[in-house]
Amino acid sequence: MKKKVEKEERLSLTRIWSEVKSDHTDEEGVTHIDAFITKDDNEAGSVIAHIDLDGVVKYNVEAAKTDELAQEIIKKVVDDKLADKQKLVDQVVKWIIFECDGTEFNFGDSTAIELLLMSCKTENLTAYLPEGK
């Protein structure tokens, strides 16, 4: 019985908030991670972290780095943003190959280009593509 109590106490230390949401992304593509201590609809939440288009997390609350629920939500948002960026990189690679078609460049494997593009900011990748691509 003692082990169960210790486990419950440990869980309460790793989970501060009862609800964590990632349902607001601003016009610059930054997702705001909001946390609520209770499930009361009238409670004002706190923005505990921001995640930019490149999946970089900026913590506003240090405890969000170790809170189990916050990390679960943050990881999902980061994974989604990195998947979106990979899709964008794929588009840019295709565009580069298209632009170089018929030139002296012969692309067999585009892995090096993809690795290079993943290090670019998402906004720069978006700006490179012609509108509608």
Image (cartoon, rainbow, N blue to C red):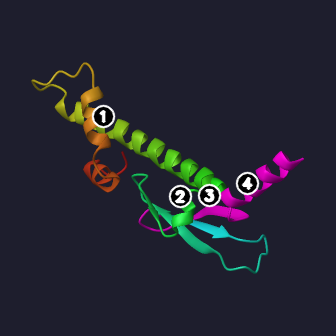
Where is residue 117 drawn, in percent x and y? 28, 41
Amino acid residing under circle 1 = Glu
Asked whether the residues under the numbered discs 2 and 3 touch, taking CB atoms below 8 Å apart as contact, a structural biologist would say yes
**Does 99 appear above or below 79?**
above
Count the marks: 4
Amino acid residing under circle 4 = Leu
Label 1 residue SS: helix
Amino acid residing under circle 3 = Asp
Q: Residue at x 52, y 69 (%)?
A: 61
Label annotation for residue 11: 4
Where is residue 108 drawn, in percent x and y? 25, 18
**Residue on which the image places disc 1:** 114
| Mark 1 crowd level (few <14, some 14–19, many ≥20, 10 Å Cα) | some
Real-space Cα separation, disc 1 to disc 2, in angstroms? 30 Å
Label annotation for residue 65: 2
Mark 1 or mark 3: which comes first in sequence?
Answer: 3
Mark 4 or mark 1: which comes first in sequence?
Answer: 4
Region rendered in magenta: 1-30
Q: Nearer the viewer, residue 84 or 11?
A: 11
